[in-house]
Image (cartoon, rainbow, N blue to C red):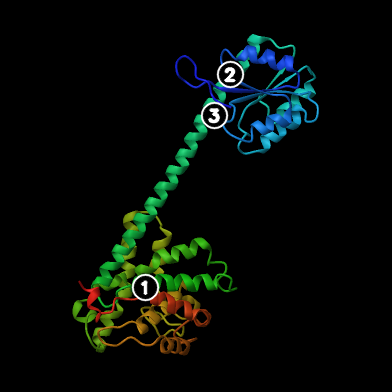
């Protein structure tokens, strides 16, 4: 089928006429051809073949009484296909019974014209339904555009949010320049643990897809409070004296306070900030209650913080710091295992031990540049 153009250059609407009587096809073609591009089909099967490939007609005039596949069956097949279901169908039939008419509407037809036809009536009905279709197409296209635009804006806002989170977190990390890719590694460690635990009876109700995505987004803010720690302590190349350690411990509270301040400025709850606050404030707590800042014990420690505790300690152990060389993966795994039930949630440790090879691969993929490699420092 091809679209003909009218004298004004605008494409004509295409009408598909389906009738098993050649005389009726000729009559309808002669009536409509002055205004529209007319395509004909001698039965329902031929009509469906024509509708299987574009371009599709703008409206269908469909006879009811046809051999093989009648008009009702043809209409039902048209409305069953996503590509053709929005094309308006007008039944043409000699049947004047209201039950026949009702059946046509039930199948999705927009109108019902009885034979013998009145040419002015047919032209008026066709014009009306083409106008209605044009309006419906416009609204459908507009709705599709708006949906696409909302999706685009949502993705854009999410990307801006992610960049902002990393920028905020990097403020803390750049003051401790030995941590390098720590943010990325801990993000993936936490997500890997959460995905492994999502079907565990203790965690299944919380660890949904949405919540795991929130964990991944929130994880980089776990040490945001380090921005408030003086350089003489944060960058000290040796162990802390007790007074210095007390100051260092305040980074958890400083992180919580910074995130709460952001929440107050937003004026509305934000899920990832609540999760980030749980991580920042609680990732130094220990399962046996000997951690800080509040000495929480067991499941009183928020789950995001328990996941980060394992991720953060593992990464600290295997990473070179100014005061220590990197620890081999196997030794770090042994220390994490020794902390099962004391430092860490036992089930989280069990998941870690099962996933240790994946942790090793994440550490390799996001490893810090080798400080002895001169090619990394142009």
Q: Which mark is residue 136?
A: 3
**Residue 229 seen in the current view:** no
Q: Disc 1 versus disc 2: distance between alpha carbons?
A: 64 Å
SS under mark 1: loop
User: Going from the N terminus, do you reach mark 3 or mark 1 first?
Assistant: 3
**Residue 66 seen in the current view:** yes
As drawn, 36 above or below 198: above
Q: Disc 2 versus disc 3: distance between alpha carbons?
A: 12 Å
As drawn, 16 above or below 365: above
Badge 3 local density, few (<14 within 10 Å), some, or many (20+)? few
According to the image, label 1 marks what residue? Answer: 366
The location of residue 95, given as percent across then percent down, is 79, 18
According to the image, label 2 marks what residue? Answer: 128
Which quadrant of the view contains residue 160? bottom left
Closer to us: 187 or 218 = 187
Image marks 2 and 3: residues in contact by CB distance under 8 Å: no
């Amino acid at each position: 089928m091809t679209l003909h153009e009218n004298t004004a250059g605008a494409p004509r609407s295409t009408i598909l006429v389906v009738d098993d009587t050649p005389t009726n096809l000729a009559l309808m073609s002669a009536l409509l051809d002055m205004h529209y591009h007319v395509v004909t089909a001698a039965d329902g099967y031929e009509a469906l073949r024509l509708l299987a490939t574009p371009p599709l007609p703008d409206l269908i005039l469909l006879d009811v009484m046809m051999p093989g596949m009648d008009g009702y069956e043809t209409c039902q097949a048209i409305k069953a296909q996503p590509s053709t279901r929005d094309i308006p169908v007008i039944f043409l039939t000699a049947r004047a019974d209201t039950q026949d008419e009702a059946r046509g509407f039930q199948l999705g037809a927009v109108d019902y014209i009885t034979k013998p036809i009145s040419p002015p009536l047919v032209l008026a009905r066709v014009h009306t339904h083409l106008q209605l279709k044009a309006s419906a197409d416009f609204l459908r296209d507009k709705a599709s555009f708006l949906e696409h635009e909302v999706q685009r804006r949502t993705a854009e806002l999410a990307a801006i949010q992610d960049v902002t989170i990393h920028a905020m977190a990097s403020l803390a990390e750049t003051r401790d320049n030995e941590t390098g890719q720590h943010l990325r590694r801990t993000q993936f460690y936490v997500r890997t643990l959460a995905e492994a635990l999502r079907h565990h009876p203790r965690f299944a109700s919380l660890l949904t897809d949405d919540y795991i995505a929130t964990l991944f987004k929130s994880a980089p803010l776990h040490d945001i409070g380090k921005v408030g720690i003086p350089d003489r302590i944060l960058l000290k190349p040796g162990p802390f004296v007790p007074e210095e350690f007390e100051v260092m411990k305040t980074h958890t509270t400083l992180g919580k306070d910074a995130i709460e301040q952001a929440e107050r400025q937003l004026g509305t709850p934000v899920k990832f900030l609540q999760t980030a606050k749980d991580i920042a404030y609680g990732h130094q707590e220990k399962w046996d209650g000997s951690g800080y800042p509040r000495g929480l014990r067991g499941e009183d420690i928020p789950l995001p913080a328990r996941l980060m505790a394992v991720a953060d300690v593992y990464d600290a152990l295997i990473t070179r710091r100014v005061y220590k060389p990197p620890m081999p993966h196997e030794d770090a795994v042994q220390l994490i295992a020794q902390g099962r039930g004391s430092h860490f949630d036992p089930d989280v440790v069990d998941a870690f031990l099962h996933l240790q090879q994946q942790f090793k691969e994440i550490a390799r993929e996001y490893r810090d540049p080798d400080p002895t490699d001169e090619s990394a420092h142009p």
